[in-house]
Every structure is written in structure tokens, then in C-alpha cells.
Image (tube, rainbow, N blue to C red):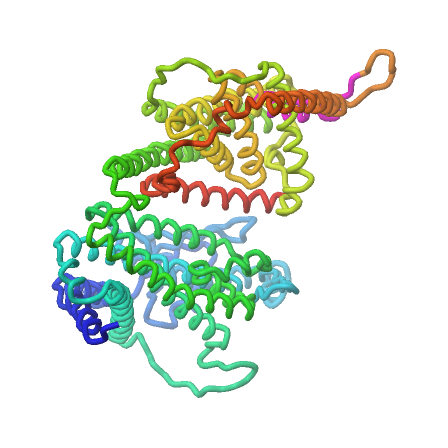
């Protein structure tokens, strides 16, 4: 490293920022905003000439005892002037802003009933003082009426306090800790976004103006990259320091801030004005980890920005790291002081970038592990110079426009790379918009349903209402998303179907067998492994299925509608949209979306698995009716089990009633056995004749270039936003289901 040139470049970057007129304007506006924000209430009193004018409390009271208590409690200071039974006439136009009318009338249940009238909203402390005085008057009336002393009345009115003890976690001050968790994740996240945006913009500008080429003739790429990262970290530090100074000055202008020194005492821990060792360690961990994370991510961001060809692309490059950090921010806010951190999460917290979000959180809830803390620091400190060395070359090549795709200078490959990037970004927009439409319309339908459930659906029982609301939400959300995707589907000129090597009835039976084998496996092993012990159907009230209409609605809503509309959207529309990009991508990606759209862990895992079955069937048959039928059978069995629960059938020749659930289970068992037999025959035949080589899904793609082209989906902001929405909705749904379960 050439220290002299590095220092000059570092000083140049700093000076360019701090001497900018927009930096000065921003800080002036920020300083003024803090002064106005912190001293707003005090400024109101300065500009309000009547600010010290007392409130006139007009009391219209038939019970003189209440008014006398109010007079005694409130007229001791200069804030109130009390007039009792003065017959004050008022309306919205004539009432003064400092007039308060208190109408008191008799009431059997409340002893007396009060109405507080004012011209507009008044300060909460004024209302609190009047309320406290009224409570005092009421307690005295209770004392006289029921011969109970004031202490007993206050004891009856006091809240019941329950001290909770959790042996495995430190739940003391849990709400404060939860707020600190939110702040420790939110503040770094927004700072990251600001810094990354500045780096991307600056690198892009220097590249477009060719000034980067001039700089690289004088300094090495490592010096250039390091100066870029450290200068922005330093700028962030200075800006943060200035904000703290602005706050202290703003708070001290009218004497709000009082700085006092306190002796340091050691008593069960190091404390200064309530600051404990735990908080000090938390702040140190938060600052230290986020500084290291900021340096690491800034290196990556500068490298990505250098590889772009325009300012627009540079801005889009910010979305990649922003998307990653936003996911971590969302996940961090779900960590609760009331729950013990799992060993898996402790292991994940050692990974760089993740540690910057998780370690401070673990520290504040007193669940930090010294081993994982040290390991995370070692990995983070090791990765920074490693990433710096690896990224320096890519940073230089990007600035000098050394475009290399798979180490080839072939113009055709370069054009193909650009086209695929554009196509997948556009595909991300289509899918992301469809997801936003789906979730948005479902939310709107749910809200409207709750609003009108007591009017339009008042004649239906609870089960019928729940099914009708779910039915409306399903259709109302999936149809607009379906129509939107269909706008972008290209017509397939070839109507030939893939050769299946198996009859469709056998394929149907094999598919049903696979689905229920997977369901048994998930129930017995996967769900127990993840601790998923809830049933989504428990959230719906099925206790009023005594009417034929309710039973029909259960079957129609849970089986028929999903089989039709979900298959039209997730299979026909999405696979038709995605199949130009490959069979594997179309089937797997549509299955991932099918799982995520269910927005809870148990259904998502299972839906993804059976989505692979449904997708494969549609892709190779081009017949949506088959996947609809299998989907209906899968959901229909669950619906029939609910409808026929506690119902028996008297079998001929046996003479004993047999539960319908047992009959359904027996039929499923027979279908699984027959399906397994057909599957074994099919696999042995295909393997023997080596026909599997001609099955398109198993054929190796000839295009091995651009292996990671699917990541271009995340270049679209709408797609990133839609994924974040799905994750937030899934977390909320998961918490609700866990609480019910």
C-alpha cells in the first residue's frame, strides 16, 4: 500500500463530501428541525400570547358535593378558574378555547355521569387532573353511600399485578428490551441503505466521468477501494456525531437538558445513572459489529456498483444488499425476550453479516454465548481482508469496463448475458406484481368481510360465515393476479404434449399415493422436528356444520375452489409464463410460490412438495384438469373428514356401525398400495428400456452458461418488495397459529 497516495485519496473523498453545499444545507435543515421538534411545545407558548391564561372550568352540577370536591382539588393553582352553576351559554362558534364545561348528572350505576365539553382538544394533563378529581369525588360518595373506607375502595379499583418468573430466560423489562431489539436492527439497517446508496452513486459517477480511470493510473485498485470504504464509514461517523451535537444543543436551548455528574458505584454491577454493565456491553457489541459489517458490505457494494454500466443500474445494485439486510431486520424483530434462543440460531449468529443483527440482540436479552461471540468476531475480522483482496480485482475490472462473462470474449455470449438479465428482471416484475395483487386483494377482502359480516352475512351461522368469507377472499385475490399474469404469457405455437410412458389413470393413482405418503412423512417426522404442532383448520369454527348448506360450503371452499383457481394460477398461468426458461425452473419456482402463498410453515412445506407433483403433471400433459382432480382429491379428503366427523355407516353383513373416518383412511391406504405398485412397475420399465434419458425433466440442459441467472429476479424492486411482504405476512400468521396451537 502506498500510504501517501492513500491518504491523499482519503482526504480528497472527505473534502469532496464536507465542502459540498448540499451537505451544509442538509445539516442546517437537520439542526433547525431538531430545534423545532424538541422545543415545539415551548415554542407554542412563546408565540401564543394567551399561553398563561387559566382555563375556566364551568361546572353544572346538581350535586354540590361533587363541585365542592372539584373546587378544592383544582383551584389550588393558577391553571384553573372554577365557576359553579353559572348557566354558561355556549355553542361551537361562541365558546372560548380556554372554556371547559363539565356537566354532571345523576346516574345509578356510576353514582354520577359526567360530560366534558370544550372548543377543541385540550392537553392530556388537564384532562388527567379533572379525571383524578372526579375519581376522588366518586370515592368519597362511595364511602358515604356504602360505608366503605377510601383505602378499601382504592384497593378494589387497583390493577391486579402478576409477577411472572421464567426460569430459562431473563424476562425483566421485556418491553424495553423488545424496543431495543427493534432499534438495534432498524437504525443500522437505515444507515446501511444511506451509505450503500452514496457509494453506488459516487462509484457510478466516477465511472461515467472516466475519473476512476485517471485515479487508477496513480493508485492501486486496493488503495482506491479501501479509501472509498473507509471515507464513507468516516463520513457516517462524523454525521452521527453531528446529529448528537445538534440534539444536545437543541435540548439545551430552553433549559430542557440538565447535565449532572454521578459517582460511579460498584454494587452488583457497574452502574452510572441507571446504565448497567449489560447495556454498556450491548452498546459496545452493537457499535463494534455494525462497524465491521458496514465495512464488509461497503466493499461488496462498491464492487457491485463498479460492475454496472449506468446510474440506474448502480441504484438497482443497492437493492441486492438492501434486500438481504431487510430480511435480517425482519427476522431480528421476531426474536423475543420471553423465548430461549435455539442452538441453530446461535450457530447462524456466528456467520458474518448475520452476527451484526443477532449478537447485539442476544446481548440485550442476556442470552449471548461467549463461544459464539468470539467465533463470530473471528469470522468477521477474517472475512473483511479476504473480501477486500478478492473484490479489489473485480472492482478495478468493473471500473475499466473489463466485461468478462465466463472468461469469454464472445460477443454472442455477452449479448445473451445482457438479454437474460433483462428478461429475468422483467419476469421478477411480473411475479412480484402478481404477489402484491394477491396479498393486497386478500387483505382488502378480509377487511371488507369483517366489516360486513354482521350485516350481509348475519343470517348465516359461524361456520357458514367463515367459509363464505374465505371463499370471497380466495376468489377476490387470486382472479386479479391470474388475469395480470395472463397478460404476459406468450402463446405456445406447439400443441404437442410430452411423451409420458404411462397411462393417465395410473399417473393419477401414483400421484395420490405420493401425496399421502409425503403427508404421513411430514406429519410424523418433519413437523415434529420443527415443533409444528398446530393445525391450520383449528382457526376456523366447524362446530355449526349441522346444515346441508354449511357442509356444502366446507367442501366447496376447502376443495373445489382451491382445486380450480389455485391450479389455474400456480400451474397453468405461472408454468406457462416460466416454461421458456426451462422445465426445472418453471416447476420448482411455481411450487416455491405455491408454498409461500400459504403463509404458514406447515402448509408451506407440504404445499411446496405437492406443488412439484402438480407442476410436473401439468408441464408434461398440458392438461390442467388432471392436476385439478388430484388437488381436489387431496383437499376433498380433508373436507370430507371434517364433514363426516363422528358419523358412522352401518356396513352390510357386518351389522356394526363403522366410523366414516375409518372408511376414508382404508380407501387411502388401498390407493397408496396400488399407487406404489404402479410406481414400481413404471420405474422398472423405464429403467430397463432407458427411456428416462428421453424424459425432458431429467435431460441435462445444454445451456450451462449463466448458472446463477435466476438471481436476476432480485434486481427488480417489486419482486424484492413482494418477497418481504410474504415473509412479514408469514411471520404474523405463524405467531397467530402458534398462539392458537
Horizontal side of residue 161 vs 260, given as left or right: right
Q: Is residue 318 left or right of residue 368?
A: left
Q: Nearer the viewer, residue 220 or 153?
A: 220
Residue 368 appears in which quarter of the rendering? bottom right
Residue closest to the eye, 705 or 307? 705
Viewer-closest of 509 and 465? 509
Q: Which residues are magenta?
A: 631-649
Q: Residue 443 in magenta? A: no
**Residue at 61% across / 23% down in the picture?**
511
Q: What residue is drawn where x is 66% and y is 45%?
A: 528
Residue 226 pos. (x, y %): 27, 66
Residue at 34% from the left image edge and 49% from the top image edge: 320
**Image x and y of residue 299, in percent:** 31, 60
- The spot of residue 600 in percent (x, y) is 54, 40
- Residue 451 visible in the current orientation: no
In the rendered image, which quarter is residue 220 located in? bottom left
Q: Is residue 407 above or below residue 160?
A: above
> Where is the C terminus found, in terms of image quarters?
top right
Is 17 placed above or below 591 here?
A: below
Task: Report the predominant secondary structure element of the magenta stretch.
Answer: helix
Q: Is residue 276 visible?
A: yes
Q: Eyeballing the image, is 240 above or below 700?
A: below
Q: Which percent across, then down, holds residue 403?
A: 24, 47
- Asked whether 291 or 414 is in front, the reply is 414
Q: Is residue 635 magenta?
A: yes
List the single residue furthest toward the top. Answer: 652
Amino acid at each position: 500500500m502506498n500510504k501517501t497516495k492513500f491518504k491523499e485519496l482519503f482526504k480528497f473523498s472527505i473534502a469532496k463530501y464536507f465542502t459540498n453545499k448540499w451537505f451544509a444545507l442538509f445539516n442546517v435543515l437537520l439542526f433547525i428541525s431538531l430545534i423545532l421538534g424538541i422545543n415545539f411545545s415551548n415554542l407554542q407558548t412563546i408565540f401564543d400570547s394567551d399561553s398563561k391564561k387559566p382555563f375556566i372550568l364551568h361546572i353544572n352540577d346538581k350535586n354540590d358535593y361533587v363541585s365542592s370536591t372539584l373546587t378544592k382539588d383544582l383551584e389550588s393553582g393558577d391553571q384553573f378558574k372554577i365557576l359553579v352553576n353559572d348557566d354558561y351559554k355556549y355553542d361551537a362558534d361562541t365558546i372560548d378555547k380556554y372554556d371547559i364545561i363539565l356537566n354532571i348528572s345523576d346516574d345509578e350505576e356510576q353514582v354520577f355521569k359526567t360530560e366534558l365539553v370544550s372548543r377543541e382538544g385540550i392537553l392530556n394533563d388537564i384532562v388527567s387532573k379533572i379525571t383524578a378529581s372526579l375519581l376522588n369525588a366518586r370515592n368519597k360518595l362511595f364511602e358515604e353511600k356504602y360505608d366503605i373506607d377510601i383505602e378499601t375502595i382504592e384497593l378494589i379499583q387497583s390493577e391486579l399485578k402478576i409477577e411472572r418468573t421464567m426460569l430459562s430466560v431473563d424476562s425483566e423489562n421485556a418491553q424495553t428490551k423488545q424496543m431495543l431489539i427493534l432499534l438495534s436492527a432498524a437504525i443500522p439497517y437505515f444507515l446501511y441503505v444511506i451509505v450503500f446508496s452514496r457509494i453506488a452513486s459516487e462509484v457510478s459517477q466516477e465511472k461515467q466521468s472516466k475519473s476512476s480511470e485517471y485515479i487508477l493510473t496513480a493508485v492501486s485498485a486496493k488503495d482506491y477501494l479501501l479509501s472509498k470504504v473507509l471515507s464513507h464509514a468516516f463520513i457516517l461517523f462524523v454525521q452521527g456525531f453531528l446529529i448528537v451535537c445538534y440534539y444536545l444543543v437543541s435540548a439545551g436551548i430552553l433549559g430542557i437538558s440538565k447535565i449532572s455528574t454521578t459517582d460511579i458505584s460498584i454494587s452488583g454491577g457497574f452502574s452510572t445513572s441507571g446504565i448497567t454493565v449489560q447495556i454498556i456491553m450491548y452498546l459496545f457489541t452493537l457499535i463494534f459489529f455494525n462497524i465491521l459489517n458496514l465495512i464488509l458490505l461497503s466493499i461488496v457494494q462498491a464492487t457491485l456498483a463498479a460492475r454496472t454500466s449506468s446510474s440506474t443500474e448502480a441504484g438497482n445494485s443497492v437493492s441486492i444488499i438492501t434486500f438481504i439486510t431487510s430480511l435480517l431486520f425482519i427476522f431480528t424483530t421476531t426474536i423475543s425476550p420471553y423465548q430461549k434462543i435455539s442452538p441453530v440460531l446461535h450457530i447462524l449468529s456466528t456467520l458474518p453479516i448475520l452476527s451484526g443483527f443477532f449478537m447485539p440482540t442476544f446481548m440485550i436479552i442476556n442470552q449471548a454465548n461467549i463461544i459464539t461471540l468470539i467465533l463470530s468476531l473471528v469470522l468477521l475480522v477474517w472475512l473483511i481482508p479476504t473480501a477486500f483482496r478478492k473484490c479489489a480485482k473485480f472492482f478495478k475490472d468493473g471500473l475499466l469496463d473489463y466485461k468478462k462473462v465466463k472468461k469469454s470474449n464472445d460477443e454472442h455470449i455477452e449479448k445473451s448475458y445482457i438479454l437474460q438479465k433483462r428478461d429475468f428482471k422483467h419476469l421478477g416484475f411480473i411475479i412480484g406484481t402478481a404477489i402484491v395483487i394477491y396479498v393486497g386483494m386478500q387483505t382488502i377482502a378480509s377487511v371488507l368481510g369483517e366489516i360486513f359480516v354482521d350485516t350481509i352475512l348475519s343470517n348465516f351461522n359461524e361456520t357458514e360465515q367463515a367459509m363464505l368469507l374465505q371463499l370471497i377472499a380466495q376468489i377476490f385475490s387470486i382472479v386479479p393476479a391470474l388475469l395480470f399474469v395472463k397478460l404476459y404469457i406468450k402463446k405456445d405455437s406447439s400443441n404437442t404434449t410430452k411423451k409420458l410412458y404411462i397411462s393417465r389413470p395410473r399417473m393419477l393413482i401414483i400421484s395420490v399415493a405420493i401425496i399421502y405418503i409425503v403427508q404421513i412423512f411430514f406429519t410424523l417426522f418433519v413437523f415434529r422436528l420443527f415443533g409444528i404442532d398446530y393445525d391450520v383448520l383449528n382457526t376456523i369454527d366447524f362446530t355449526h356444520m349441522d346444515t346441508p348448506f354449511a357442509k356444502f360450503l366446507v367442501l366447496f371452499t376447502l376443495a373445489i375452489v382451491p382445486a380450480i383457481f389455485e391450479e389455474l394460477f400456480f400451474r397453468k398461468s405461472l408454468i406457462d409464463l416460466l416454461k421458456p426458461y426451462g422445465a426445472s425452473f418453471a416447476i420448482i419456482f411455481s411450487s416455491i410460490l405455491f408454498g409461500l402463498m400459504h403463509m404458514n410453515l406447515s402448509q408451506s412445506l407440504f404445499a411446496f412438495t405437492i406443488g412439484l407433483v402438480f407442476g410436473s403433471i401439468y408441464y408434461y400433459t398440458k392438461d390442467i384438469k388432471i392436476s385439478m382432480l388430484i388437488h381436489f382429491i387431496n383437499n376433498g379428503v380433508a373436507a370430507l373428514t371434517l364433514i363426516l366427523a363422528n358419523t358412522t355407516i352401518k356396513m352390510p353383513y357386518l351389522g356394526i356401525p363403522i366410523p366414516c373416518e375409518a372408511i376414508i383412511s382404508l380407501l387411502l391406504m388401498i390407493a397408496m398400495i396400488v399407487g406404489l405398485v404402479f410406481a414400481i412397475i413404471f420405474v422398472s420399465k423405464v429403467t430397463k428400456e432407458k427411456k428416462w434419458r428421453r424424459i425432458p425433466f431429467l435431460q441435462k440442459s445444454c445451456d450451462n452458461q449463466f448458472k446463477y441467472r435466476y438471481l436476476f429476479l432480485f434486481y427488480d424492486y417489486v419482486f424484492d418488495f413482494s418477497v418481504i411482504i410474504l415473509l412479514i405476512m408469514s411471520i404474523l400468521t405463524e405467531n397467530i397459529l402458534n398462539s392458537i396451537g
